[in-house]
Image: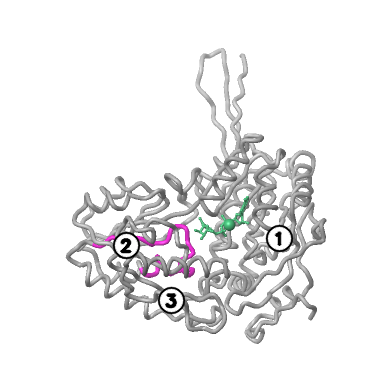
């Protein structure tokens, strides 16, 4: 093993293929079908957040590398094999990628857990979802229809849906494989080419997927991967004059920077940003189910989920009972080594996130919330662990109730009636998701209409299926991903007139 090999105390439970991938030397950029070092020669370390140990050394791409990647993507789009490959063949590539993700799912899952820290069972589910999304968009490749537009008998008009061109895709670290599938699969299904920038915290699953995409035979330049940091590699994608569309998932703050940068050449933009989602529990709800699934809704992936159930609004008459039960659920969570199958919560992704979340725990005490569970870092001597945390006595106006914490932290706030629940629920700058727990069917549907959120879950939480659109109202972004909506994001429409 060379110096980039993991010094990881968990080597014994890693698959040989994972060890082989990690120890193969510094990770490179994928540009024009070849793995190349960054032009500057610079590299950075990616860390295992459970042990604070170096997992691998990765090429640090910047402006110059993004430029090369865009040129490769442009060449593949305009003059390479890609434009002449028909939809049936494109579909086959996507099906093949889905199969390869499934064949290598265990390895990919371990890489997700090593790089991100989420429990292995969640990573296995993430790999399965990524494969499903590639397969779903493989199905779409042959169903991207145009229209015929009715007019006078002397005129024939039709519309074509065409790929946009070179797509820059900047993704976060919380779903390092699933967020790629949401962006790359529809982009390719529509016939675009891609320059992908994984998050600097979790480059490994993306790089392994890049290898699998080459194995699937995806032509050179169709997928390019530039690892590196946001203000350099990411900003270069946002500002690049020859990128036609940029898709971003991450913080609202950076989303605004991307939007500003896109003005240079009026790139098409889609943004999936932060959230502070209301999870509303009425007194008539199935309480046991509401407690169990609300806990999962906020604690999955250590709470580092854009649509996490972070603001729990509970009807006054059941407030105390709900608070007690959800705190008990939080205390049942097993915090620890994420590769261990019995672990239900791992560490946060990075030291930066750890400090950020611990800062909010301090703020919660200053703001006068009552700690019902957690409220402090985990007992582990190493690793970025935070105990699952529930605050009661919180008000919707407190900063801990308004700002995206992106950690395993929920506030429980009482409400009086439907009207109060809607007013408090909608009182946020975000609008990504919401949930309602009630046995009253009309109330459930009434609230689904009244809540300003891109996804509403009724008597469930956090279900996301590629069949349905996902995205935000307000400062949670704009554009809808998944379903047929991604086809809209990745195509231009052209109208053709024929005088008969
Ligand atoms: P971030 O928004 O800075 O990073 C997300 C992606 O954007 C990464 O690939 C990063 O390299 C890139 N990026 C950063 N600065 C950029 C720039 N100037 N131009 C172009 N790309 C840039 O998020 P970060 O710093 O990792 O986390 C901060 C907070 O953002 C979290 O605490 C959370 O509140 C939120 N967040 C939301 C996510 C979501 O799923 N909506 C995902 C990740 C973070
Ligand atoms: Mg950032």
Residue 146 is situated, as x and y percent measured from the top left of the image, at 57, 33
Asked whether disc 1 touches disc 3, contact meaning CB atoms under 8 Å apart, the reply is: no
SS for dot 1: helix
**Which is more toward the observer, 282 or 263?**
263
Residue drawn at x 22%, y 72% is: 321
Return the x and y of residue 92 as percentages of the image width and height: 66, 53
Q: Nearer the viewer, mark 1 or mark 3?
A: 3
**Residue hosting label 2:** 312
Image position of 269 (left or right of 396): right
Give the quarter the ligand 2 occupies: bottom right
Q: Which residue is mark 1?
A: 210
Q: Residues within 10 Å of mark 2 (few under 14, many from 20)?
A: many
Residue at which label 3 appears: 376
**Under tag 2, what secondary structure?**
strand
* Mark 2 vs 3, N-terminal side: 2
In this picture, which residue range is highlighted in magenta? Answer: 295-314
Please state which of residues 394 and 280 is positioned toward the viewer in this rendering: 394
Q: Secondary structure at mark 3?
A: loop
Check contact, mark 2 vs mark 3: CB within 8 A. Answer: no
As measured in the structure, the alpha-carbon distance from the residue carrying label 1 to the one carrying label 3 is 38 Å
Quarter holding the C terminus is: top right
Q: Is residue 119 above or below residue 190?
A: below
In primary-sequence order, the first of circles 1 and 3 is: 1
Residue 398 is drawn in which quadrant? bottom left
């Amino acid at each position: 093993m060379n110096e980039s090999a993991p010094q990881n105390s968990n080597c014994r439970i890693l698959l040989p293929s994972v060890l082989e991938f990690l120890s193969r030397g510094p990770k490179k950029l994928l540009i024009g079908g070849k793995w190349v070092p960054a032009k500057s020669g610079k590299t950075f370390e990616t860390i295992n957040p459970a042990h604070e140990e170096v997992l691998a050394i990765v090429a640090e791409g910047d402006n110059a590398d993004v430029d090369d990647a865009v040129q490769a993507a442009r060449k593949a789009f305009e003059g390479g094999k890609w434009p002449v490959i028909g939809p049936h063949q494109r579909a086959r590539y996507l099906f093949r990628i889905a199969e390869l993700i499934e064949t290598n799912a265990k390895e990919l899952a371990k890489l997700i857990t090593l790089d991100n820290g989420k429990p292995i069972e969640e990573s296995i589910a993430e790999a399965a979802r990524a494969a499903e999304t590639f397969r779903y968009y493989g199905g779409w490749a042959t169903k991207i229809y145009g229209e015929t537009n009715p007019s006078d008998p002397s005129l024939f008009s039709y519309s074509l849906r065409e790929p946009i061109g070179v797509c820059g895709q900047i993704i976060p670290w919380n779903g390092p494989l699933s967020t790629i599938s949401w962006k790359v699969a529809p982009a390719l299904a529509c016939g675009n080419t891609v320059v992908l920038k994984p998050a600097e915290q979790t480059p490994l699953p993306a790089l392994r997927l890049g290898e699998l995409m080459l194995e699937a035979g995806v032509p050179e330049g169709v997928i390019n991967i530039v690892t590196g940091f946001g203000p350099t590699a990411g900003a270069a994608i946002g500002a690049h004059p020859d990128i036609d569309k940029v898709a971003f998932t991450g913080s609202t703050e950076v989303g605004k920077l991307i939007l500003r940068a896109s003005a240079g050449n009026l790139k098409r933009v889609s943004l999936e940003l932060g959230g502070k989602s209301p999870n509303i529990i009425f007194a008539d709800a199935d309480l046991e189910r509401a407690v169990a699934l609300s806990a999962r809704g906020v604690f999955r992936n250590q709470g580092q989920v854009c649509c996490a159930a972070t603001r729990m609004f509970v009807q006054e008459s059941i407030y105390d009972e709900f608070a007690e039960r959800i705190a008990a659920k939080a205390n049942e969570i097993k915090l620890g080594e994420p590769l261990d199958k019995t672990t239900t919560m791992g560490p946060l992704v990075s030291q930066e996130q750890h400090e950020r979340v611990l800062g909010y725990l301090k703020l919660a005490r200053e703001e006068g919330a009552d700690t019902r569970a957690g409220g402090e870092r985990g007992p582990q001597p190493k690793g970025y662990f935070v105990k699952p945390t529930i605050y009661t006595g919180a008000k919707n106006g407190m900063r801990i109730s308004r700002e995206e914490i992106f950690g395993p932290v929920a506030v429980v706030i009482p409400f009086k009636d439907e009207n109060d629940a809607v007013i408090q629920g909608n009182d946020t700058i975000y609008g990504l998701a919401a949930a309602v727990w009630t046995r009253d069917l009309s109330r459930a549907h009434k609230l689904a209409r009244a809540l300003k959120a891109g996804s509403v879950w009724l008597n469930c939480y956090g279900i996301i299926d590629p069949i349905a659109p996902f995205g935000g109202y307000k400062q949670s972004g704009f554009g809808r991903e998944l379903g047929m909506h991604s086809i809209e994001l990745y195509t231009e429409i052209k109208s053709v007139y024929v005088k008969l």
